[in-house]
Image (cartoon, rainbow, N blue to C red):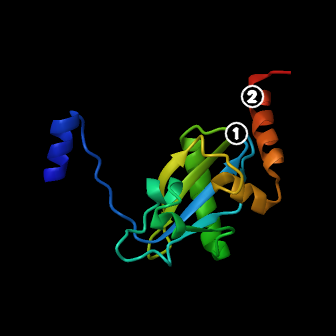
Amino acid sequence: MNRCEYISDEFHQPAIVEEFIDGRELNVSILGSEEPLVLPISEVDFSTMPESFKNIVTYQAKWEPRHETYHRTIPICPARLTKKIERGVQAVALTAFRIMGCRDYARIDMRLDKKNKPFVLEVNPNPHLSEGMGLMRSAETHGFSFGQTLGMIVEFARRRSKIT
């Protein structure tokens, strides 16, 4: 309650309180709009994360190579999931993609709880497109090259905007 009051007083807006889902973290990348393609699911492996850090992909874990957590959030693509869990995660990701009005490409970050129920953490309609990272990792695992993936994204936008 103290922290909520601080946020309200300091920033003059309501605070959002969410339950922390302690479980597997998944990144689900999607290409397309009318008939979106769910790419191979990627998992963030926290198994080597020291106990002094939380199993969260922080700014340091994403962008600071000198920080220990950068080397302790290891991507596994494709994620090792049962077919049932994979289908459930894909369905939730596609629902989130559509509800949020995403088009052309997006990445949905999720957590599986202890019962393997998926929870959406974030819908990212404009994820990072560097080679070997995030969406591109999943596209490459699917068999698309970096250039092919960028070309598809441009083509989806071109078709949607009717540019010839």
The residue lying at 58 percent from left, 41 percent from top is: 125
Which residue is painted at 48% across and 56% down in the image? 120
- The residue carrying mark 1 is 104
Q: Residue at the spot x=62%, y=51% of the render?
A: 94
Q: Quadrant of the C terminus?
A: top right
Q: Are marks 1 and 2 in contact (CB under 8 Å)?
A: yes
Q: Quarter-wise, where is residue 85 in the image?
A: bottom right
Amino acid carrying label 1: it is Asp
- The kind of secondary structure element at disc 2 is helix
Nearest the eye: 161 or 130:
130
Task: Examine the rendered structure and indicate whether residue 13 appears above or below residue 36.
Answer: above
Q: Which mark is residue 160?
A: 2
Q: Residues within 10 Å of mark 1 (few under 14, many from 20)?
A: many
Q: Please state if 25 lies on the left or on the right of 42 as rendered.
A: left
Could you tell me residue 37's position as x and y percent?
Answer: 74, 51
Tag 1's secondary structure? loop
> Is 4 left or right of 63, judged from the image as shown?
left
- Picture coordinates of residue 10 (x, y %)? 18, 37
Res. 44 in view: yes
- Quarter residue 49 falls in: bottom left
Nearer to me, 156 or 68: 68
49 on left or right of 136: left
What is the x, y in percent for residue 139? 75, 55
Frontmost residue, 113 versus 9: 9
Cα–Cα gap, marks 1 and 2: 9 Å
